[in-house]
Every structure is written in structure tokens, then in C-alpha cells.
Amino acid sequence: MTERKPVYSLSISGRLTLELHSLNNEGTEGNQTMTRIVTLVDPEGNIHKVNAISGDMFKHIQAEHFYLLARERGLPLCAGCQTFRSDRILGDNEFIKWTQKHPDSKVIDELLKKCCLDDAEGVLIAPQREQPSGEGERRERRQGRSIPRKSVAEFGWVVGLPNKVRTESYFHVRYAKERGGTGEEAQAQPIFHRPASSGIYAAVATFELARIGFNDISQTYPISEEERLRRYQAFLESVLYTFVEPNGAMRGTQNPHIVAFEGVVTVSHAVLPAPTISPLAEDYREQVQRVAQALDPAGQHLRVYPFTNMADFAATMRQILETTRPYRLFGEGG
């Protein structure tokens, strides 16, 4: 069996074509759902207002896919993450009590052993403590000490290319049981205006895979290499699923049409950043190739995988998943 090659980091730069989606909105004004809009400035200084999907949304999509894979494969999850709570390990009361009696380094060690989701997706351990006041006075809640665990995943905004994305508003009504109803029944037919966006979107993401299972305080790995490999494989698979099935708002009736996905996957096999260039630039793929060559002139430690469609992307990610393992900081031996 061929030895797996270590991966320090992996990045994705690509253009994703989505038709008729409403994955990420800002709320409502009256009966109008407001789509999320951001401002871009092009190289000539022109300002563009474009539809966008937040990095928070894509991070949540990836974390949910990872959670489902973790449950299916028996990876460790804390009490909070077993039900996919938004506060993660803060929902594990026994662990939070335990943290008050131990130093930060040991807390992170225990967190890494206890939960793969907190390990990969990050969490801020900042429990609230009740401070007793005088007799008959109300208790005050004060912030306990904060211990951060930085996420392995970094997602940028998925933003529409200027002049290549459009949002329309569509009429929607929830009908009453009987047509032409009167009184309360007629009033139970609220009218909505829902957005649907179509266009080409720029996506960038970076994943620090060497940090899976790594304690940033003690600079050690408290979990085994076998466990790190299991988490690494589930994590990469969740990244693939994120682009194949981008969950979000209004998918029940506005499941997006994924028409195209093209770009580059960059993989670093040593302590080098896997470069990204925003797909807002027309020559982003060529720039990624040139940056990789400048960082690694011998071509031994950086590999750039171009892809032209979703099938190519899926095949590339599957190949990386099956032939690599997470890099071990301070222990690779060259």
C-alpha cells in the first residue's frame, strides 16, 4: 500500500454558478424578504452592489455535514455537539464545571479528546458564573475565563461577480382551504414577496489540516494519529459535500440549481501556505499557479489541481482524501 502524503493545508478558489436560490437573507421588511447584499470595488474604483452568501452560512453548512459524518462513523462528540447545539461544548455542563479547576492547556487537551466538532470547527469556552451577592440580593452573572479553540476551516464570503448576478422578487401566497373564503379565512392568506438570485459567485476557503487534534497552547497532539486520520477524512468529505449540497434558507421550494463549478484546489505538503486568489480576478487560476511556483520553485511541496466542473472537483477531493493524511507539526521528520 502506498504511503499517504502529509497535507499541511488545503485551499479552494472557484467560481460557482447558482440559479434561482435564496440561501442567505438578511430578514424581512413587512412582507418582503430582503436578500443579502454586499459592496465590491473593482480595480478601476467602480462600486458594485452584489448578492452574496456569507462565510458564516458556508461554515455552518460544512459543520453540519461534518457532524452527520461524525455521528455515522462513531467519532467523539461532546454532550452539546451530540444534538448539534450552536454553543457546542458549552452545553456540556460537566465539562464546564471541570474546566474551572484545570489550566488552559489541559482544558484544550480534554476538549480535543472529547469532541471532533469542537476540534475542527472551533469554539470559545467562556462560561457564565453566578456571583453570590448579599443576603436577599439578586445574584450577578459574570464572565468566567475565556479559552479559545480556533477553527481549522476559514470560509470567505461567496460573492456575486459584478454584472454577473441578478436578484428578482417573486409573489407568493399561502392559500386558504377554500377558494374565495370570507372573514377570518380570507384574512389567513398572507402575501409574501420572496427573492431568487441567479449568477456566478466567487468562493474562497482555506483549511489548516495540520491543526486537526493540535493543542495550540502546549504545541502537542493529545490524540492518536489514527484518530487524526479519521477526523481528517470526515472533514475533507464534509468540505466536498458543502459545495455539492449547499444547504441554506428556502431550500424546500427554492433548492438552487448548481450549473457549474470551476477553479483550483491547492494542497501544501510542507509548512507552506496553500495559496488562494479571489475568483473576482479573471486570471485567478493562473495567479494561483504562479504564486505556488514562487513559493515552491522545485515543485516538491505545493500541488495545484485545476477543475472545470463539479465532477472534476469531486474526483479531485476524493483522490486527495484517499491518498493523504494530516501533516504532523514538529514531528514530520522532514
Image (cartoon, rainbow, N blue to C red):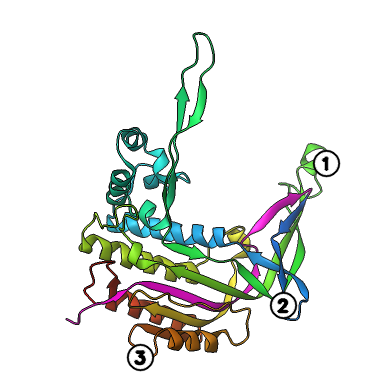
Amino acid on which disc 3 is placed: Ala
Kind of element beneath mark 2:
loop
Q: Which of marks 1 and 3 is nearer the N terminus?
A: 1
Report which residue position mark 1 lands on: 182
Rendering quarter of residue 228: bottom left
Cα separation between marks 1 and 3: 78 Å
Asked whether 144 falls inside the magenta stretch, the response is no
Measuring 36% from the left and 36% from the top, which residue is drawn there? 96
Q: Position of residue 4 (x, y in %)?
A: 24, 77
Kind of element beneath mark 1:
loop
| Residue 298 numbered mark, or none | 3
Cα separation between marks 2 and 1: 54 Å
Report which residue position mark 2 lands on: 42
* Of the pair 181 and 34, the residue shown nearer to us: 34
The reply to whether discs 2 and 1 touch (Cβ–Cβ < 8 Å) is no
* Of the pair 197 and 85, the residue shown nearer to us: 85
Q: Where is residue 264 in the image (x, y as percent from the top left)?
A: 48, 82
Kind of element beneath mark 3:
loop
The magenta span reads 1-30
Q: Where is residue 254 in the image (x, y as percent from the top left)?
A: 63, 64
Measuring 72% from the left and 77% from the top, which residue is drawn there? 42
Amino acid on which disc 2 is placed: Asp
Measuring 76% from the left and 47% from the top, which residue is drawn there? 189
Identity of the residue furthest to the top in this view: 135
Cα separation between marks 3 and 2: 34 Å
Q: Is residue 305 visible?
A: no
Q: In this view, does 290 lie above or below 317?
A: below
Amino acid on which disc 1 is placed: Thr
Q: Is residue 252 above or below residue 301?
A: above
Q: Where is residue 157 in the image (x, y as percent from the top left)?
A: 59, 66
Q: Which of marks 2 and 1 is in front?
A: 2
Q: Which of marks 3 and 2 is nearer the N terminus?
A: 2
